[in-house]
């Protein structure tokens, strides 16, 4: 299952709180079936078929293809001095 670093959790919580109700909303990762390219959006709730990952107050909704592709990964985030967010996907250690 996808895991989140503490930094990613904090960034997701802040992004969602700015754009939607943090009680039900989350960051949605949508992936193409044949590519390792992902679209990231803030959504008010998971869509039917989404896998939900929670880390603290952060919620991530994984579309079916993204869920399979990211099953053994870890999501990290960085915020630039200008406020731009960049997500990075890495391998979970110990797997």
Image (cartoon, helix red, strand yellow):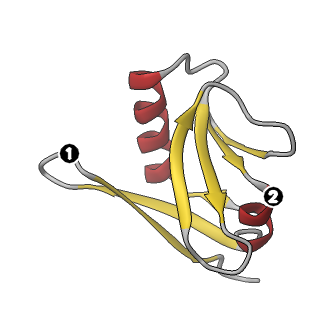
Q: Secondary structure at mark 1?
A: loop
Q: Which mark is residue 64?
A: 2
**Residue 76 horizontal/vertical position (percent):** 48, 62
Q: Residue furthest right?
A: 49
The quadrant of the image that shows the C terminus is bottom right
**Residue 66 placement: quadrant:** bottom right
The spot of residue 37 in percent (x, y) is 55, 72
Q: Mark 1 or mark 2, which is nearer to you?
A: 2
Label placed on residue 1: none
Residue at coordinates 72% horizontally, 83% vertically from top-left? 94
Task: Tell me if residue 70 comes above or below residue 44 in the rendering.
Answer: below
- Outermost residue toward the left in this view: 82
Q: For this rendering, which residue is in front, 51 or 7?
A: 51
Image coordinates for residue 75, horizontal then vertical, percent:
55, 62
Relative to 18, is 55 on the left or the right? right
Badge number at residue 83: 1
Q: Check whether the beta carbons of the residues at disc 1 and disc 2 lie within 8 A of each other.
A: no
Residue drawn 48% across and 33% down? 13
Residue 2 drawn above or below residue 20: below
Residue 23 is left or right of residue 82, and the answer is right
Seen in the image, is 75 located left or right of residue 78? Answer: right
- Which residue sits at x=65%, y=76%? 92
Residue 46, by quadrant, is top right
* Residue occupying image coordinates x 12% and y 48%: 82
């Amino acid at each position: 299952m996808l895991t989140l670093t503490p930094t990613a959790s904090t960034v997701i919580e802040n992004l969602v709180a700015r754009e939607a109700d943090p009680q039900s909303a989350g960051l949605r990762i949508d992936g193409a079936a044949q590519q390792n390219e992902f679209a990231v959006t803030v959504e008010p709730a998971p869509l039917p078929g989404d896998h939900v990952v929670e880390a603290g107050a952060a919620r991530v909704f994984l579309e079916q293809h993204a869920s399979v592709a990211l099953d053994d990964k870890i999501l990290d985030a960085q915020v630039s001095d200008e406020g731009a967010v960049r997500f990075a996907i890495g391998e979970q250690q110990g797997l």
